[in-house]
Image (cartoon, rainbow, N blue to C red):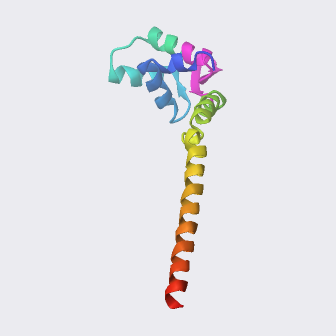
């Protein structure tokens, strides 16, 4: 997890991840797509890919002189699971007070029903 959120803090790196979400891409395609959006050099893109790879967010596959990048599903899943654990039950701190409140409401209802049932019986007598 070290470095994952630091890597995600850079907008260009997030754009690279979004691009790779469509599937494996050669580095030239990544550069061309990013250049269509804003001026960026091939060495700058390579540096961003290096950071993403070191953070465990992308993988690289060599085929001859070409490099193909893809999302690292395991690295992304680890980040997702870590975040999910933080958000697992955002209402957990309120669970005990809400349970106590529900108990008191139920007691109040039972007491009210007992009073109204007793009043009805005495009226019919």
Question: Where is residue 5 drawn, in percent x and y?
Answer: 53, 20
Q: Nearer the viewer, residue 40 or 114?
A: 114
Number of marks drawn? 0
Residue at the (33%, 23%) spot, across then down: 37
Residue at the (55%, 49%) spot, across then down: 98
Residue at the (60%, 39%) spot, across then down: 88
- Residue 56 falls inside the magenta stretch: yes
Q: Which residues are magenta?
A: 50-72
Residue at the (58%, 19%) spot, across then down: 67
Q: Nearer the viewer, residue 36 or 3?
A: 3
The quarter of the picture where the C terminus appears is bottom right
Query: With respect to residue 118, does 111 lie above or below?
Result: above
Query: With respect to residue 78, does 66 lie above or below?
Result: above
The quarter of the picture where the N terminus appears is top right
Question: Where is residue 59 drawn, in percent x and y?
Answer: 62, 23
- Residue 90 falls inside the magenta stretch: no
Q: Nearer the viewer, residue 15 or 42?
A: 15
Question: Where is residue 113 drawn, in percent x and y?
Answer: 54, 73
Residue furthest out toward the bottom: 125
Question: Where is residue 53 drawn, in percent x and y?
Answer: 60, 18
Query: With respect to residue 43, does 20 lie above or below?
Result: below
């Amino acid at each position: 997890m070290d470095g994952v959120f630091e890597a995600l803090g850079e907008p260009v790196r997030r754009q690279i991840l979004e691009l790779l979400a469509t599937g494996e891409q050669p580095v030239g395609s990544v550069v061309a797509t990013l250049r269509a959006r804003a001026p960026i050099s091939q060495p700058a893109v390579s540096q961003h890919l290096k950071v993403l790879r070191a953070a465990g967010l992308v993988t690289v596959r060599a085929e001859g002189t070409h490099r193909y990048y893809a999302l690292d599903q395991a690295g992304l899943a680890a980040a997702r699971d870590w975040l999910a654990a933080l958000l697992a039950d955002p209402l957990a701190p309120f669970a005990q007070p809400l349970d106590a409140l529900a108990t008191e409401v139920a007691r109040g209802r039972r007491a009210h029903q007992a009073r109204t049932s007793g009043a009805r019986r005495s009226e019919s007598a």
